[in-house]
Image: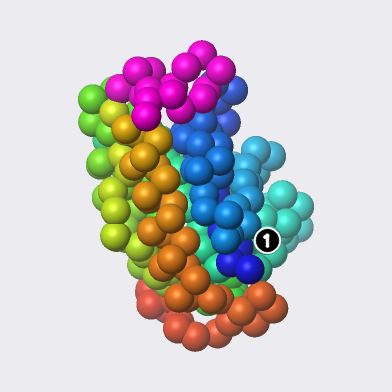
Amino acid sequence: MTLILGIAGSLRRGSYNAALLRALRELAPASIVFEEASIRGIPVYDGDVEAESGLPEPVRALKEKIATVDGLVFVTPEYNNSLPGPFKNAIDWLSRPAADIPRVFGGRALALCGATPGPGATNLAQVAWLPVLRVLGVRPWLGRFLSVPNANKFFDESGALVDEKLRERARAFIAGFAEFAVGSQAPRSGARSEPKASGVEKV
Ligand SMILES: Cc1cc2nc3c(=O)[nH]c(=O)nc-3n(C[C@H](O)[C@H](O)[C@H](O)COP(=O)(O)O)c2cc1C
């Protein structure tokens, strides 16, 4: 069974990105298992904490979860035309130690999407993730684009995705990604060593 893990990069209670993630889970094909993970509880990265105590427990747990999945969906907000700090901070922790990157992220299918109440649709945030994905050594899926502007028009007050056209786009997005992720079939043992994360040596 193909296992996909979605992570929303916002802690906000009424997060549109968390709402989009829930919609993707609802609309995912029955042939896959779609789980959600949160970045809640991950502290601000501090190299001294890492050197003295290693990885905080929420980071350790999320790392080991990621190491078992076939595909990842990053549902990203956009902050100041770029990556949202809390999400990037979580990925920074998850990339430590760098020698673990191939085991945790290497070769895993990854899709990006995002939502904003603004007009820019998270396009710039999604582009800003690309160099990070290169360091992680994931297999990015670029088959479809799911970038939601004016999110307040598409989600109701409970966070449900109520726009029929966008629901169809979200359904096609997650179905297309599931097909791609099946092809990757990352090993469940977490023992993956190939392909190498291409940028690791340089960071
Ligand atoms: C520091 C900060 C910077 C932001 N910059 C952008 C931006 O560049 N583009 C944009 O569309 N929205 C921007 N926003 C608005 C966010 O898209 C909005 O807060 C959104 O609801 C965040 O995602 P969430 O609903 O998942 O929490 C910014 C918000 C914050 C707090």
Which secondary structure class fits the magenta region best? loop
> Magenta residues, as a range?
150-164
In the image, is 156 to the left or to the right of 121? right
The answer to whether residue 104 of the structure is visible from this angle is yes
In the image, is 1 to the left or to the right of 71? right
Q: Secondary structure at mark 1?
A: helix
Q: Amino acid at mark 1?
A: Lys
> Residue 161 lies in magenta, yes or no?
yes
Residue 143, image x, y percentages: 29, 60
In the image, is 118 to the left or to the right of 40? left
Q: Quadrant of residue 189?
A: bottom right
Which residue is label 1 attached to? 65
133 vs 90: above or below: below
Residue 164, image x, y percentages: 37, 29
Question: Is residue 197 or residue 175 the one in the foreground?
Answer: 175
Quarter of the image that includes the C terminus: bottom left
Which residue: 65% across, 38% down?
40
Which residue: 38% across, 18% down?
152
185 vs 23: above or below: below
Q: Report the coloring of the rendering.
A: rainbow
Residue, far bottom: 194
Quarter of the image that includes the N terminus: bottom right
Which residue: 51% across, 25% down?
160
The answer to whether residue 50 of the structure is visible from this angle is no
Residue 52, image x, y percentages: 73, 59
> Residue 78 lies in magenta, yes or no?
no
